[in-house]
Amino acid sequence: MDRKHKATISFNREKSEAAANVALDRFLPGLDQPSPSAEPTIAEICDGYWLENGQKDNFLHSAKPIKRELGNLTPGMVSQITVRRYAVKRRDRANDTIRTELKYLLAACAWATNEWGTPPLKTKQPLPPSPPRDRWLTKAEARKLLEVTRA
């Protein structure tokens, strides 16, 4: 039994154009992104640091905006101007929040320098610390404090 199978190819112009548009929509947003390099990105460094250093939730929370804003950059691309722009974008947050996020970035990049040999970040904190908070004791707290000191 020697049968030949004939494959039929049908060309649907509308489906082809739709597929091309989908591919183009996926391609175009990447044009303004830096080209891939052998050096790890900030997002990869943050992930590696988190995995190697106990997977702490506070780092994971603080790294989200860092990864969102700077994640596609490599440490060699991050300058003092980049850090200032990041701080300006995050102005809706307290100075100490932004400072904490940047401290985590510096810690992760220092870890990557030691572990992977990436260039170190040479940036400074762009913001002063937030002013201290004033907090007044409630009556219940004051009573409890007086009771403890009398005992």
Image (tube, rainbow, N blue to C red):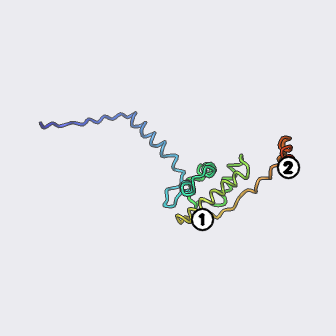
Element under label 1? loop
Q: Mark 2 is on which residue type?
A: Ala
Instruction: In this rendered view, identify the residue nearer to me: 96 or 4.
Output: 96
N-terminal of the pair, mark 1 or mark 2, is 1
Which residue is painted at 62% across and 52% down in the image?
Answer: 59
Question: Element at badge 2?
Answer: loop
Task: Tell me if mark 2 has few (under 14), some (14-19) or many (20+) residues whose alpha carbon lies within 10 angstroms of its own.
Answer: few
Bin the neighbour count of mark 1 within 10 Å (Cα to Cα): few under 14, some 14-19, many 20 and up: some
Identify the residue at horizontal 54%, vertical 52% (top origin).
33
The answer to which quarter of the image holds residue 42 is bottom right
Label 1–label 2 contact, CB within 8 A: no
Q: Position of residue 72 (x, y in %)?
A: 55, 53
Task: Return the mark for residue 12.
Answer: none
Reading the image, the residue beneath label 1 is 120
In percent of width and height, residue 62 lies at 64, 50
Image quarter hosting the N terminus: top left
Front position among marks 1 and 2: 2
Residue at point 86%, 43% (across, down) = 143
User: In front here: 42 or 135?
Assistant: 135
Q: Is residue 21 above or below residue 64?
A: above
The residue positioned 57% from the left and 57% from the top of the image is: 53
Seen as rendered, the residue at the extreme left is 1
Tell whether 100 sits left or right of 43: right
110 vs 133, left or right, is left
Q: Quadrant of residue 108?
A: bottom right
Q: Nearer the viewer, residue 143 or 110?
A: 143
The x, y position of residue 71, in whole percent, is 57, 53
Taking 123 as reference, is 9 above or below it?
A: above
Decide: is 13 above or below 34: above
- Residue holding disc 2: 151
What kind of residue is marked 1? Pro
C-alpha distance separating marks 1 and 2: 55 Å
